[in-house]
Amino acid sequence: MSTTRHLVNRRRRLATVTATAAPPRTATAPEGAASPETPETPETPEAREEPEGGGAAEADPGSKGDGDDAPARDGRPRGRMPRLRIRLPAVLCAATVLLGAFAAWAFASAAALRDDPTRQNTALTDMSRTSEVKGQITEAVGAVFSYTYASPGKSDLAAQKYLTGKAVQQHKDMLADVRAQAPKQKLVLTTTVTESGVEHLDGDRARLLVFADQSNTRTGKEEETTYAAAMFAVDAVRRGDTWRIAAIDTFTR
């Protein structure tokens, strides 16, 4: 009996010494743990030291505290790629809108340049065509604005050859008085172009400014000649190989 009590007291003393040497434990011992009477091996300082950063550093990556923006183990932020995938379509849409606006502006600018009369005027660049229209219109003006009472049909033939469009009626109105007085006064009207210039040339259409001298001679009993200078513009069109006068502008209203 004394021996048994002696052993029990010895175990209690060992348990007391062990509890004094070890740090106090805050966690509650789980059920089924060893009885306090069982002697425990004291922990060494190395075994009691926890790794730097605490146990939280070894938390499960899929735990509740790991959010989308939390940094990954390699240091790169999580959740950045989904944001890039969301922003990329917006950037592409903005670029498409800008490119579309630029294309519309470029198309409008090109159309404006094509419609600009100064861009279409080849009077100073196409010297061959400019010389052609200038020579033929000079001849046409001299023919249609000359009239003699002795052969009125000559003026009509010239009008048929060199006039077209509304210039036909304009020519008749301008020479109406001459035709009416020519047989009685034996009139002879002569028109000579002194200078002409191509103001505008675009393909088969042109506009010219014409300077001319006119002499009106009465060949009756008393011959009398009067002189006058004329300035007018003509619109010309090309029919085949011939330039014709399509309109006459005398700058009067």
Image: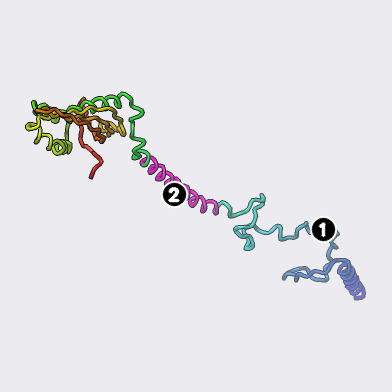
Q: Residues within 10 Å of mark 2 (few under 14, many from 20)?
A: few
Residue 162 or residue 64, whichever sits in front: 162
Q: Which residue is mark 1?
A: 47
Q: Quadrant of the N terminus?
A: bottom right
The single residue placed furthest to the left in the displayed view is 184
**Position of 169 compared to 46: left or right?**
left
Front residue of 210 and 80: 210
* Residue drawn at the location 75% of the way across and 60% of the way down: 54
Q: Is residue 63 left or right of residue 118?
A: right
Which secondary structure type mostly characterizes the magenta part of the structure?
A: helix
Question: Which residue is disc 2 drawn over?
Answer: 97
- Number of numbered markers: 2
Please report contact status of discs 1 and 2: CB closer than 8 Å, yes or no: no
Asked whether residue 147 is in view, the answer is no
Residue 84 horizontal/vertical position (percent): 54, 51
Compared with 85, 189 (above or below) is above
Residue 47, quarter of the rendered image: bottom right
Tell me: residue 199, above or below residue 97: above
In front of the other: label 1 or label 2? 2
Determine the residue located farthest toward the front in the rendered image.
222
- Amino acid type of the residue that numbered disc 2 sits on in the rendered structure: Val
Residue 210, position in %: x, y?
Answer: 27, 32
Stretch of the chain drawn in magenta: 83-111
Element class at badge 1: helix
Residue 105 is covered by the magenta coloring: yes
Q: Amino acid at mark 1?
A: Ala
Residue at 49% x, 52% y is: 90
Considering the image in quadrants, where does the C terminus appear? top left
Cα separation, mark 1 vs mark 2, equals: 67 Å
Where disc 2 sits, the SS reads: helix
